[in-house]
Image: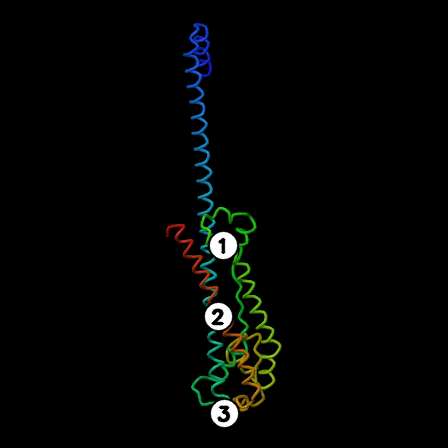
Amino acid sequence: MIKFYRKIRQKLLTENKFSKYLIYAIGEIVLVVIGILIALNINNWNEEHKTQSMEKSVLMDLRSELSANISRLDSIISERENVLSAGRLVLEKSGPDASWDSEVKFDSLLFKIVLSGWKFFPESGVVTDILNSGKLNVIQNDSLRYMISSLPADIALLNDEDDTYRMDLHGYIAPFFSGNYAIRNIVKDNGLFDQNMDLGSTKFRTNPESLLRNQELEGVLTIQTIWTNTAIGLYKRQLKNYKTILNLIDRELEL
C-alpha cells in the first residue's frame, strides 16, 4: 500500500502536476491523522472498558464483604441490646429492700451481664486491598470513594470503644460479680463449657437478694449501661454507613 502511494506521488511530480500533488499530499496527511485519531479512540475505549470491568469487579467484591459485615454487626447489636435489657431489669429490682420475684431466671440475666464483652471483628481484606493497591481510583462515584476511604477510621473508633468497655468489664464489672455472687453456677447453667470443662456447681449459697441489696451493684450496672448504650449507638451508626455504601454500590452496578 505504501509503495502504491509512493508511485502516485512520483508520477505527479514527474508530470509537473505540483498542485495536484499538493492536494494529494494534504489528503494523505488528513488520512493519516484520521487513522491516528481512530486508533487513539479505539485505545481509549479499550482502556475505559478495562477500567469499567475492574471497577465492577472491585465493587462486587466489596459488596460481598460489606454484606457479611452487616450481618455480623446486626448480631453484635442484638447481643448488646440483650445486655442492656438484662442490666435494666436487674437495676429495676435492686434496692435496700429488694427481692427477686421476676419470672426471668436471675442467673441467666447475670450471664448476659458478666459475659458481655462482644467485639466487632469486621472482614476487611477487600477494603484494605482497595486502599493499598490504588484500586480506589477506578471507582467513579466521589461519595462512594470518600466513604470507602473513611472505613478504617470508623472501625478504629469502634475498636477503641470496645477495648475501653472490655477493660472495665475485666477490671471492674466481672470481678465485682465474681466476688459477690456464685459465678460458677452462671457458667454451668448456661452451658458455656462442654463436658470436658465442666466446673460443677458451687457449694456456696446463692442469694439474689443479697446482691440486689448491694449499693455497689447499682453503680456497676449504671456504668455498664452507659458504656453499652454508647457502643450500640456507634454500632448503629456504622451499620447505617455500611448500608449507605451498599446502596451506592447497587446503583453503580445497576442492581
What percent of the width, then of the height, locates residue 138? 48, 46
Residue farthest toward the right in the current orientation of the protein: 171
The tag earlier along the polypeptide, 1 or 3, is 3
Disc 1/disc 3 C-alpha distance (Å): 53 Å
Of residues 169 and 154, which is closer to you in this image? 154
Q: How many other residues sit within 10 Å of disc 3, few (<14), some (14-19) or many (≥20)?
A: some
- Against 30, is 217 above or below? below
Q: How many other residues sit within 10 Å of disc 2, few (<14), some (14-19) or many (≥20)?
A: few
Q: Is residue 102 left or right of residue 156?
A: left
Disc 1 on helix, strand or loop? helix
What percent of the width, then of the height, locates residue 149? 52, 55
- Against 40, is 65 above or below? below
> Could you say which quadrant of the image residue 33 lies in?
top left
At x 49%, y 52%, the residue is: 145
At x 59%, y 76%, the residue is: 168
Q: How was the colour assigned to the protein in this rendering?
A: rainbow
Disc 2/disc 3 C-alpha distance (Å): 31 Å
What residue would you read off at disc 3?
A: 98
Amino acid type at image mark 2 = Gly
What percent of the width, then of the height, locates residue 100? 47, 89
Q: Give the numbered dot on residue 233.
A: 2
- Against 57, is 241 above or below? below
Q: Give the numbered dot on residue 146.
A: 1
